[in-house]
């Protein structure tokens, strides 16, 4: 894979001291555990592949429960500081905590233990959940390039695909009353229009005083001009519905992760995102001359499985796949702007070149992309 197709810089580079973190987490646990628990924190780890948004801290903790001393493997998700040039303008970690509590029992998620909304303990809000063991399809290098996913049998990948789409169907069936803190929508069409408006606002925040992307301007105009009408009920949407955010064991989901993009919207918001994020990696794989996984998470197969699982026949999927590609491009534009800001990359002459899949977006706009993703 040549430099033109290289992975864009990821927001990592934590400068936290693990020794200090151990002390801070231990002091904080004293405030949330019953008196006499005597918590001790150990084995604090900052993963080298920290996330695209919030910071992840792995740690072990032991405390007294009744008459017993018990050990716990935990994860803290911490909101990023402003000096890190975060990917999103705000991070509501408490909402993520509430979402994980609401979806538990419908889809597998790690048990969430506490939400700390203040900044005194770690310098930013965070929540703590139990750690779950399993396999995650890698992003770097993409799982399509060669991983436990490519090494699986066709039957194993089929089980993985059906179960992953089943996660979406299960999420979309949860009553919206459980997510009142995310807002309401009169129907799926109104929710989609509101979502597109929020993406336009996010894009304006991303470009700020920097050069705009002519391609993204065209894409957003096209999305607004062609938004489909949908009078069906809006549903709870995961928002970042991709297999790279699922932990698997024996090709079945054991933990659904990363809820910062959760929203109320049409079902196809999640379906299109799951299809496109695989296509994004698959297109990179094809450009690298590798076999990839062309028969995995195909548009029509995903739609059929979703209909079988939910009774809902997905509509306008090309629109929603295009919308996913645009949303992803705005995020990648921000990530690349961050890399330029921190000296990890050089600003290109054409701002559109900051979008790794700008060719895909152009092909979607002119209608030449769709024949290869049925």
Image (cartoon, helix red, strand yellow):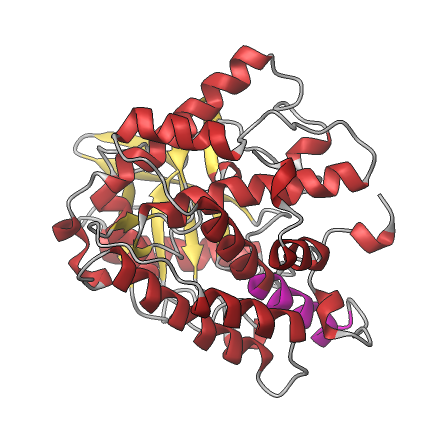
What residue is drawn where x is 82% and y is 77%?
Answer: 349
In front here: 338 or 300? 300
Left or right, 24 with respect to 87, comes to: left
Q: Is 246 on the left-hand or right-hand side of 188?
A: right
Residue 327: image x %, image y %? Answer: 52, 60
* Residue 360 in view in this figure: yes
Q: Which residue is found at the position 78% from the left and 74% from the top? A: 350
Where 138 falls versus 41 (above or below)? Answer: above
Q: Is residue 70 magenta?
A: no
- Which residue appears at 62% of the width and 52% of the height? 367
Single out the residue that lies furthest toward the right.
2
Predominant SS along the magenta part: helix
Taking the image as drawn, is residue 37 in sight? no
Q: Residue 132 appears in which quarter of the rendering?
A: top left
Between 128 and 343, the one nearer to me in the picture: 343
**335 drawn magenta:** yes
Residue at x 66% of width, y 41% of height? 281
| Furthest-left residue in this view | 177
Q: Position of residue 363 (x, y in %)?
A: 67, 54
Image quadrant holding the C terminus, namely top right
Q: Is residue 343 above or below residue 369?
A: below
Q: Using the image as rendered, state which of residue 67 and residue 368 is in the foreground.
A: 368
Q: Which residues are magenta?
A: 330-343
């Amino acid at each position: 894979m040549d430099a033109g197709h290289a992975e864009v810089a990821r927001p990592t580079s934590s400068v936290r001291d693990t020794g200090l973190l151990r002390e801070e987490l231990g002091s904080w646990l004293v405030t949330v555990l019953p008196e006499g628990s005597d918590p001790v924190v150990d084995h604090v780890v900052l993963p080298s592949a920290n996330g695209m948004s919030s910071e992840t801290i792995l740690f072990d903790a032991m405390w007294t429960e009744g008459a017993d001393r018990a050990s716990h493997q935990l994860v803290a998700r911490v909101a990023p500081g402003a000096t890190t040039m975060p990917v999103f303008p705000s991070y509501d970690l408490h909402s993520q905590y509430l979402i994980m509590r609401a979806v538990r029992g419908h889809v597998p998620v790690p048990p969430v233990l506490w939400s700390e909304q203040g900044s005194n303990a770690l310098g930013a809000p965070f929540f703590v959940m139990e750690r779950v063991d399993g396999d995650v399809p890698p992003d770097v290098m993409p799982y399509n390039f060669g991983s436990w996913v490519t090494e699986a049998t066709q039957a194993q990948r089929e089980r993985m695909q059906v179960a992953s789409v089943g996660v979406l169907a299960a999420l979309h069936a949860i009553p919206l009353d459980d997510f009142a803190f995310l807002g309401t929508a009169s129907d799926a069409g109104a929710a989609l229009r509101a979502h597109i408006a929020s993406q336009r606002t996010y894009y304006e925040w991303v470009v700020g005083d920097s050069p705009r992307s002519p391609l993204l301007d065209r894409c957003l105009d096209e999305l607004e001009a062609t938004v489909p009408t949908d009078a069906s009920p809006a549903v709870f949407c995961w928002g970042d519905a991709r297999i790279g955010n699922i932990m698997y064991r024996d090709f079945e989901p054991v933990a659904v992760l990363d809820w910062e993009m959760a929203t109320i919207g049409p079902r196809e918001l999640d379906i299109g995102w799951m299809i496109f994020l695989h296509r994004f990696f698959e297109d990179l794989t094809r450009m690298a001359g590798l076999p990839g996984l062309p028969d995995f998470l195909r548009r029509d197969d995903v739609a059929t499985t979703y209909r079988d699982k939910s009774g809902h026949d997905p509509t306008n999927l090309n629109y929603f796949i295009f919308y996913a590609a645009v949303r992803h491009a705005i995020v990648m534009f921000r990530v690349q702007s961050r890399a330029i800001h921190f000296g990890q990359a050089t600003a290109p002459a054409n701002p559109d070149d900051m979008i790794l899949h700008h060719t895909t977006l152009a092909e979607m706009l002119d209608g030449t992309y769709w024949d290869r993703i049925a």
